[in-house]
Image (cartoon, grey):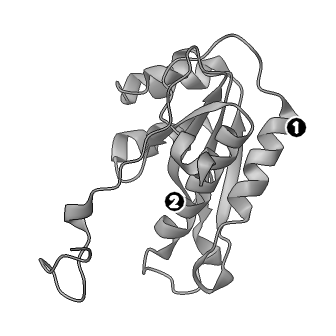
C-alpha cells in the first residue's frame, strides 16, 4: 500500500538519466496487469528522442513534463489481438498496464506522469505519424519518467462520502 500512496503525478524531472534496466522493469510491471480474456494486446514504445517529445508537446499543451522527462513509454494496443473486437476492452487493459507502470516507477524511486492520448484525435494522429504506428495499433497514453526535482509527501485520498453500501446514497460506514 505504501507505493500506492506515494505515487504522485510528477511534472518536472532532474537531468539524471533513466536507465534501460529501469524502463524494462517498468514495462514488465505493465505486462503484469490483468487484461480481458488475457488478450494482452498492449504494445510499448520506449521514447528517448527529444524531438518526439517536442512534437507531442505541440498537440498536448499540458504535456510540459515531456520537456524534462528522461524517458517515456507510449502505451498502445494491437487491435488485432482483441478477443471481443470493437468492444473497447483494450482501453481498460492498457489503462491497467499504465497504472502498474506508474506504481513500479514509484517503487524504483522515479517520478512519473500519465499523459492522456486517447480519445483526442489530434494527439492520436501526431503519435501515429511520429512513431510510425501501423494500422491497428492504437495509442492510449504516455508514461513520462524521470527523477523528481522535489519530494512530495504520500497522500491518502479516501473520501468516505463516496462509498456506499448496496445502493447509491446508503453510507457504507456509519
Which residue in the structure is indicated by mark 1?
Answer: 21
Q: Which residue is at the far left?
A: 169
Which residue in the structure is indicated by mark 2?
Answer: 95
Q: Pick whichever, 162 or 21, lies toward us.
A: 162
At label 1, counting other C-alpha atoms closer than 10 Å, the crowd grade (few under 14, some 14-19, many 20 or more) is: few
Q: Which mark is residue 120?
A: none
Report the side of 148 relative to 158 (left or right). right
Q: Pick whichever, 76 or 80, lies toward us.
A: 76
Report the side of 103 relative to 23 (left or right). left
Report the side of 51 relative to 10 (left or right). right
Name the quadrant of the C terminus.
Answer: bottom left
How far, Cα to Cα, is label 2 from label 1? 22 Å
Name the quadrant of the N terminus.
Answer: bottom right
119 to 31, vertically: above or below: above
Q: Which residue lies at the image location 43% right of the left edge and 27% below the top edge?
A: 63
Q: Which residue is at the far right?
A: 21
Q: In which quarter of the image is residue 46?
A: top right
Secondary structure at numbered mark 2: helix
34 to 111, vertically: above or below: below
At label 2, counting other C-alpha atoms closer than 10 Å, the crowd grade (few under 14, some 14-19, many 20 or more) is: many
**Residue 106 appears in the picture as rendered:** yes
**Residue 132 appears in the picture as rendered:** no
From the top left corner, tell me how far across and down residue 138 is, in percent. Answer: 53, 57
Q: Pick whichever, 17 or 134, lies toward us.
A: 17
Q: Which residue lies at the image location 67% right of the left edge and 21% below the top edge?
A: 147
From the top left corner, tell me how far across and down residue 126 is, in percent. Answer: 47, 37
Q: Which residue lies at the image location 65% right of the left edge and 76% below the top edge?
A: 81
Q: Which of marks 2 and 1 is nearer the N terminus?
A: 1
Secondary structure at numbered mark 1: helix
Q: Which residue lies at the image location 65% right of the left edge and 39% below the top edge?
A: 106
Amino acid at each position: 500500500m505504501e507505493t500506492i500512496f506515494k505515487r504522485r503525478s510528477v511534472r518536472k524531472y532532474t537531468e539524471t538519466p533513466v536507465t534501460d534496466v529501469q524502463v524494462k522493469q517498468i514495462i514488465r510491471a505493465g505486462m503484469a496487469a490483468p487484461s480481458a480474456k488475457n488478450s494482452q494486446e498492449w504494445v510499448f514504445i520506449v521514447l528517448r528522442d527529444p524531438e518526439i517529445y517536442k512534437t507531442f508537446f505541440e498537440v498536448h499543451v499540458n504535456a510540459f513534463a515531456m520537456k524534462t522527462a528522461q524517458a517515456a513509454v507510449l502505451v498502445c494496443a494491437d487491435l488485432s489481438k482483441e478477443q471481443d473486437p470493437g468492444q473497447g476492452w483494450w482501453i481498460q487493459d492498457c489503462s491497467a498496464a499504465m497504472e502498474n507502470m506508474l506504481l513500479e516507477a514509484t517503487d524504483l524511486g522515479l517520478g512519473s506522469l500519465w499523459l492522456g492520448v486517447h480519445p483526442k484525435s489530434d494527439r492520436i494522429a501526431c503519435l501515429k505519424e511520429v512513431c510510425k504506428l501501423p494500422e491497428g495499433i492504437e495509442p492510449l497514453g504516455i508514461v513520462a519518467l524521470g527523477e523528481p526535482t522535489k519530494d512530495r509527501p504520500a497522500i491518502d485520498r479516501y473520501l468516505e462520502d463516496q462509498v456506499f453500501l448496496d445502493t447509491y446514497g446508503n453510507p457504507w460506514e456509519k
